[in-house]
Image (cartoon, helix red, strand yellow):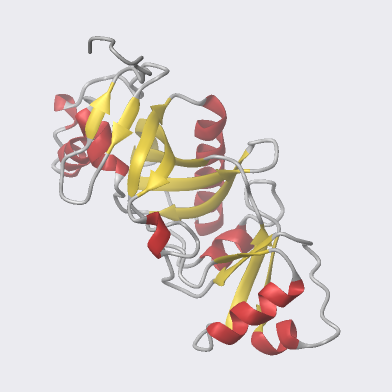
Amino acid sequence: MVISKERLFDALKDTRLVPKHITLTVNEIEDPSFINPLGFPVWIRDGAAGTASGKGAFKATCYDDLKAWVKINQGIMQFQLSEFLPGGNYGCFCLFKKGKLIKIAQAERIEYIMAKVAISGVTGNTSKGRLLNDELIKNTALDAISRLCQITGEEMNGLVVVDMKGDTNNIPIITEINIRHVAFSSSFASAGFNISEFQLLLALDRDNEISPEVEKFFPPYNLILRDVDGAPIYITEEKAFNIGESI
């Protein structure tokens, strides 16, 4: 749907659906007279087409951080600065056919596999998370998809995954939109909501074999655990155990 964060943010710039942002060249950032209009801390990253998984991404807390990061990443010719969002990390999966919403599900990413190997702390694979039923996350995703369909003049078909981060009030703000499956697909399947299967049945025009509910409701304290090569573990209720207590 969108090739880069820059194109996504520009398409929705007149809304509060995306972060405040600005795209700058290396020369502009290194200019001694440069003043960051977004303040600090700020997220700096490569906003070019096809970038993902936090490429060139860094939380800068001052102007010296910006200059140092530009110097280290000499292969990047222009950077995107965007509002730093300290809240939760969410994904909303939306499955459509001919403009009609067929299935929707939300999840929260809590921890990432091998997070320490990336300076951004984001590696693209969730090791710990939970499945959600959140109206604000859902409505934010559907609003953005509707606006983008109006811009392109196309009706939505297939899977759309809308990624979000919470702002200082944990209001979800969109950071990325993909038209492919991501790691949580298998987690939803483990919880009995197999979006991959639903998408395949739609593609084969076997819509009558799909269960009628648009959304599955998950227990409020569920937990998803994942490792590199193992299937996700779905726990319906996260519970702390005391020493000596039977499991």
Which one is nearer the viewer's eye here, 126 or 155? 126
Quarter of the image that includes the N terminus:
bottom left
Residue farthest toward the right in the current orientation of the protein: 33
Residue farthest toward the front in the current orientation of the protein: 244
- Tell me the residue at 38%/58% (across/down): 123
Q: Position of residue 129 (x, y in %)?
A: 38, 36
Which one is nearer the viewer's eye here, 199 or 22? 22
- Tell me the residue at 75%/61% (across/down): 40
Q: Position of residue 155 (x, y in %)?
A: 42, 48
Which one is nearer the viewer's eye here, 159 or 155? 159
Can you tell which quarter of the image residue 244 is in? top left
Q: Is residue 99 visible?
A: yes
Q: Check the image and report above or below for 99 versus 43.
A: above
Can you tell which quarter of the image residue 66 is in? bottom right
- Tell me the residue at 69%/36% (across/down): 169
Q: Position of residue 116 (x, y in %)?
A: 41, 59
Q: Is residue 113 left or right of residue 220?
A: left
Q: Position of residue 222 (x, y in %)?
A: 35, 22
Quarter of the image that includes the C terminus:
top left
- Tell me the residue at 50%/32% (across/down): 138
Q: Is residue 77 visible?
A: no
Q: Is residue 168 left or right of residue 70?
A: right
Which one is nearer the viewer's eye here, 213 or 43? 43
Q: Is residue 157 left or right of residue 166?
A: left
